[in-house]
Image (cartoon, rainbow, N blue to C red):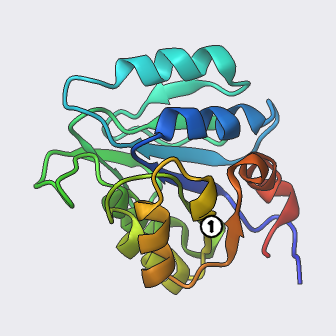
Amino acid sequence: MIESGTYEAVAIGVSAGGIAALEKILPRFAPDCGLVILVVQHMSPGGGHYLVEHFSSVCHLPVKEASDKEKSEAGTIYFAPADYHLLVEKQRTLALSMEAKVHYCRPSIDVLFETAAEAYSSALAGVILTGANRDGARGLARVKQLGGLSVVQSPETAEVDIMPRAAMDMAQVDCLLPLDRLGDFLAALNRRGKV
């Protein structure tokens, strides 16, 4: 059964092949989108500014690098900065951390998903896209455990299918969708509600 008005945030985790995948998804969010969109793209410690610049030029929503102690705002796309974990605090304030890497990654998808699940519970959709390690699988399981929606890119449409398959192995997946359908599906969540 579909109920309306239940989703407030979408957390997206992506690694190898991520820019191309995000190009298919992030521009699909309309200017009147009422969702907070949080993105972890695995990157080298020196990278990161390119993502904000690039996606600002192709998206309808404001795109920014998350700042420590920043209040998250609906209708904004936040990227985790290079070499910092992105966390969501209980009051839905964003936080940055330089704690140890998770699955050799900082930022870590697991860290974002686990903290966002605690803050948003059933109002969160967690999304795992293409990638070459297991980061995000445990976090997606936590999203599902706390009542959120678990979404995974169909492995056959991923540039690298390790991350989607790991998520499918560890989490109960609500929606398994090909990349070309994910953007419209996610963009409609704030209007569509629970699946």
Above/below status of 117 relative to 93: below
Q: Which residue is drawn at the image coordinates 60% and 79% (left, top)?
A: 173
Residue 78 in the image, given as x and y percentages of width and height: 49, 36
Classed neighbour count for the residue bearing mark 1: other residues with Cα under 10 Å, few (<14), some (14–19), many (≥20): many
Residue 128 in the image, given as x and y percentages of width and height: 52, 60
Q: Which residue is drawn at the image coordinates 56% and 52% (left, top)?
A: 158
Q: How many marks?
A: 1
Q: Is residue 75 visible?
A: no
Q: Which residue sits furthest front? A: 156
Above/below status of 106 relative to 163: above
Decide which of 139, 191 is in the foreground and name it: 139
**Quarter containing the C terminus:** bottom right
In this figure, which residue is indicated by the disc labeled 1?
151
Decide which of 20, 61 is in the foreground and name it: 20
Residue 136 in the image, given as x and y percentages of width and height: 39, 64
Q: Amino acid at mark 1?
A: Val
Residue 93 in the image, given as x and y percentages of width and height: 42, 49
**55 left or right of 81?**
right
Above/below status of 85 relative to 45: below
Q: Quadrant of residue 47?
A: top left
Q: Which residue is drawn at the image coordinates 40% and 34% (left, top)?
A: 66
Q: Which residue sits furthest left? A: 100
Q: Is residue 163 visible?
A: yes
**88 left or right of 7?**
left
